Image: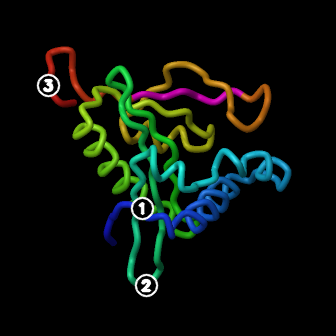
Amino acid sequence: MRIRQARLDDADSLTELAMRSKASHGYDHSFMEACREELRIDEEALAHRDLWVAETDEDGIVGFFGLWPPENAIAEVDPLFVEPSFQGRGIGRTLWGHLEQRARQAEAITIRLDADPHAVRFYERMGCVITGEAPSGSIAGRLLPQMEKVLVSPQGEPN
């Protein structure tokens, strides 16, 4: 498996992978359609976010992540998805390691994300903690766990 920067010709594949991955949590068709626009990867997403894919020669793209540039030293993860048939094989953990490296290179001291409730355990294993709730960008009235991971200690040492 290799990790490379996403390209414009990956956009449609990444959107569909995001939809399959999100749907793997048991969401129904109407829920998924409500999420489609928020999950869309397009030219604008590629221009403004640091997007990376995990791929193999045999299977093509099996996962990806996006990272917004740090604002006030906080980098936002948006999104992180793994192809459902590859979940549980370490792809997410590998992507997370690369994501942390990219955040550190961008001088972030904290990573923040709004987690799907079904993904909280994964993010906790990556060192994140729930810090509050954030409104869903797709479903009115739905609140998502907001999570963070501090990358640098108060003394300036890497965590």
Q: Residue at x 22, y 25 (%)?
A: 152
Q: Residue at x 34, y 47 (%)?
A: 99
The region drawn magenta spans 143-148
Give the percent coordinates (x, y) of residue 112.
44, 30
Q: What is the secondary structure assignment of the residue under circle 3?
A: loop
Mark 2 or 1, nearer chain start: 1
Q: Quadrant of residue 17?
A: bottom right
Give the alpha-carbon distance from disc 2 to disc 1, as whole Å: 18 Å
121 lies above or below 73: below
What is the count of numbered marks?
3
Amino acid type, callout 1: Ala
Amino acid type, callout 2: Glu
Give the percent coordinates (x, y) of residue 74.
37, 26
Mark 3 or 2, nearer chain start: 2
Category of crowding for the residue at label 3, using alpha-carbon neighbours closer than 10 angstroms: few (below 14), some (14–19), many (at least 20): few
Q: Residue at x 74, y 29 (%)?
A: 142
Q: What is the secondary structure assignment of the residue under circle 1?
A: loop
Category of crowding for the residue at label 2, using alpha-carbon neighbours closer than 10 angstroms: few (below 14), some (14–19), many (at least 20): few
Q: Main secondary structure of the magenta part?
A: strand
Q: Which residue is drawn at 66% across and 45% down?
A: 38
Q: Which mark is residue 6?
A: 1
18 lies above or below 9: above
Q: In which quarter of the image is the N terminus?
A: bottom left
Label 2 sits on residue = 58
Label 3 sits on residue = 157
* Mark 3–mark 2 CB contact (< 8 Å): no
